[in-house]
C-alpha cells in the first residue's frame, strides 16, 4: 500500500498533558514521556517536565525541579533506558542556554530515577 491508500488516522488531544503555555519537544520511552514547557510552576524559561502512562491515560505533568531545571531554558530531552541492574538511573540528555556553557545551547546529561511516578 502507498501512503495515500492507507486508512485515516485519528488524532486525539491528550487532555491531562496540555496547558495554556507552550508545550514542546516530547520524547517517550515505555510509559514515560518527557517534554519542555514554559507552563506555570517552573523555574523560569522552559523547564523539563515528565508524565507517566498508566490505566490508558497520561498523568498530570510533574516538573523535574531545580536539580535539573534552571532559570534559563531547557529543551529537547531524550532518555537512554538502562535495563541493566547495575545502573541505578536512566540517562537523560538535554540542551540548555544556562550560564557556564560554551555559548548558545549546550548539551547536559543527568541520571533520572527508573521509577518516576
Image: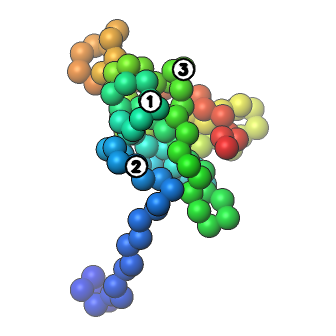
Which structural element holds mark 1? loop
Q: Position of residue 78 (x, y in %)?
A: 45, 41
| Residue 19: mark in rendering | 2
User: Going 34% across and 21% down the picture, which residue do you hit?
Assistant: 72
On screen, 14 above or below 78? below
Residue ID for mark 3:
67
Residue at 35 percent of width and 32 percent of height? 46
> Crowdedness of circle 3 by 10 Å Cα count: few (<14), some, many (20+)?
few
Q: Which residue lies furthest to the top in this view?
A: 100
Spatial CA distance of label 1 from label 3 is 12 Å
What is the quadrant of residue 5 in the picture? bottom left
Instruction: Assess whether mark 3 and mark 1 are in contact (beta carbons under 8 angstroms).
Output: no
Task: Report, in whole angstroms, how far the alpha carbon at label 2 lies from the one at label 1.
Answer: 13 Å
Q: Are marks 2 and 1 in contact (CB under 8 Å)?
A: no
Labels 3 and 2: the sequence-earlier one: 2
| Residue 66 point in image, percent of width and height | 51, 21
Residue 106 seen anywhere in this rendered image of the structure: no
Q: Where is residue 100 in the image (x, y as percent from the top left)?
A: 34, 9
Quickly name the residue at label 1.
Answer: 42
What residue is rendered at 42% in x and 35% in y? 40
Seen in the image, is 82 located left or right of residue 67?
Answer: right
* Quadrant (top left, top right, bottom left, bottom right) of the C terminus: top right
Amino acid at each position: 500500500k502507498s501512503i495515500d491508500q492507507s486508512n485515516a488516522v485519528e488524532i486525539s488531544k491528550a487532555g491531562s498533558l496540555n496547558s495554556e503555555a507552550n508545550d514542546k519537544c516530547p520524547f517517550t520511552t515505555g510509559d514515560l514521556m518527557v517534554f519542555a514547557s514554559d507552563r506555570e510552576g517552573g523555574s523560569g524559561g522552559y523547564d523539563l517536565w515528565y508524565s507517566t502512562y498508566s490505566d490508558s491515560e497520561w498523568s498530570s505533568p510533574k516538573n523535574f525541579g531545580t536539580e535539573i531545571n534552571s532559570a534559563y531554558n531547557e529543551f529537547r530531552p531524550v532518555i537512554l533506558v538502562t535495563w541493566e541492574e547495575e545502573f541505578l538511573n536512566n540517562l537523560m540528555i538535554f540542551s540548555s542556554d544556562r550560564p557556564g556553557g560554551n555559548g548558545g545551547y549546550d548539551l547536559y546529561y543527568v541520571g533520572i530515577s527508573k521509577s518516576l511516578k
